[in-house]
Image (cartoon, grey):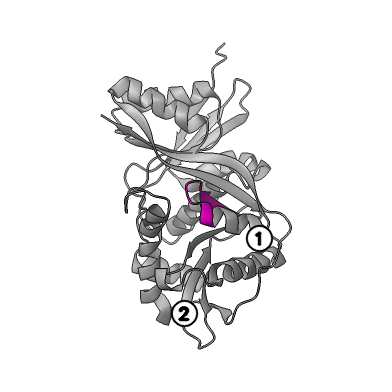
């Protein structure tokens, strides 16, 4: 009888949730990315959307059959791993190698992501570099910031072009603020239809200044297993340093908590400005994660 963990792949998000839902629900803050992305994918499948080629969801089981880890790969992003035994992380890299699945980056919780990426590099040649160190925080006691002029409002369909531009600028500007080259850790901007869907859920907000002009964007993912994740949070450069972000994030956090959700968000560990901001609002670190790349 084997004592090693076993890997079980699912091509359908609904099947994965049926198998791993209890595991995600047991630590829903740490599992927020997998839960929200998978629930969104399941909703799209229910609407008749086709599954992108190569997407999969992973359930790791111990010899008793208990779920001890999960991960996923959803186009166009690299694999994303939640905590799992080291043997499973290594076995996952070997499975990719055996079936010829090219993997040049691994994201997710440490140390699992690091162990998996190291095995990918060993098998294929190359070395592992850190593209971005991230940290997941959960809101403890909300500490309101000093008030500023203006107010929060829900984005509407007429705001979609502005929302698209600010979503697109978010990651490049975040790289620059963290001292990296612009675009190093860029994520794909949702297309117009996806942004309109997100706007329709009421989960994108704009802070308007005293004259009613939009000066900041804060968004949040739909609640999954009782947890809502804030992000992206974006202020265009000319509007920074005026308190818009602190007031918008505080108000969004309050709204989400009033709905009964636990509230979390990610920070880039290389960006001291955002880390200080969220700490002042009452966010506390939960777990460190990383975006790792395998280079020749």
How packed is label 1: few (under 14 Cα within 10 Å), some, or many (20 or more)?
A: many
Q: Secondary structure at mark 2?
A: strand
Q: Nearer the viewer, residue 282 or 155?
A: 282
**Residue 72: % across, % down:** 45, 40
Total marks placed: 2
Quick check: is 270 in the magenta stretch?
Answer: yes
The answer to whether residue 33 is visible is yes
Span highlighted in magenta in the image:
265-273
- Residue tagged by mark 1? 281
- Residue 95 position (above or below residue 31): above
The answer to which of 100 and 227 lies nearer the viewer is 227
Residue found at x 40% / y 64%: 167
Residue at the (47%, 79%) spot, across then down: 214
Name the mark nearer the viewer: 2 or 1.
Answer: 1
In what element is the residue under mark 1?
A: helix
Q: Left or right: where does residue 135 sit relative to residue 117? A: right
Q: Is residue 198 left or right of residue 95?
A: right
Instruction: Give the image location of residue 95, x and y in percent.
Output: 38, 25
Residue drawn at 56 percent across, 33 percent down:
83
Residue 152 in the image: state x and y as whole percent.
57, 77
Q: Which residue is mark 2?
A: 214
């Amino acid at each position: 009888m084997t004592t090693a963990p076993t890997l079980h792949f699912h091509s359908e998000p609904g099947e994965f949730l049926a198998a791993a839902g209890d595991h995600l629900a047991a630590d829903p803050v740490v599992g927020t990315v997998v839960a929200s992305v998978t629930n969104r994918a399941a909703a799209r499948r229910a609407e008749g959307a086709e599954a992108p080629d190569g997407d999969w969801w992973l359930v790791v089981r111990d010899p008793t059959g208990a779920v001890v880890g999960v991960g996923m790969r959803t186009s166009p992003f690299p694999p994303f791993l939640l905590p799992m035994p080291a043997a499973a992380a290594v076995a996952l890299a070997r499975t990719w190698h055996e079936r010829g699945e090219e993997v040049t980056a691994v994201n997710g919780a440490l140390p699992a992501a690091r162990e998996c990426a190291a095995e990918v590099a060993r098998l294929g040649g190359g070395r592992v570099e850190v593209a971005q160190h991230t940290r997941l925080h959960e809101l403890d006691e909300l500490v309101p910031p000093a008030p500023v002029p203006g107010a929060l409002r829900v984005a509407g369909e007429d705001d979609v072009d502005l929302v698209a531009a600010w979503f697109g600028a978010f990651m490049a500007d975040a790289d620059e603020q963290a001292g990296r080259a612009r675009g190093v850790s860029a994520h794909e901007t949702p297309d117009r239809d996806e942004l309109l869907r997100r706007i329709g859920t009421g989960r994108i907000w704009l802070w308007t200044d005293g004259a009613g002009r939009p000066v900041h964007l804060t968004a949040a993912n739909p609640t999954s297993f009782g947890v809502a994740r804030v992000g992206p949070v974006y202020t265009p450069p000319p509007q920074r340093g005026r308190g818009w972000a602190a007031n918008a994030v505080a108000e969004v956090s309050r709204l989400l908590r009033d709905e009964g959700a636990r509230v979390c968000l990610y920070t880039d560990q290389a960006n001291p400005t955002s880390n200080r901001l969220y700490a002042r609002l009452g966010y506390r670190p939960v777990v460190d994660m990383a975006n790792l790349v395998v280079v020749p």
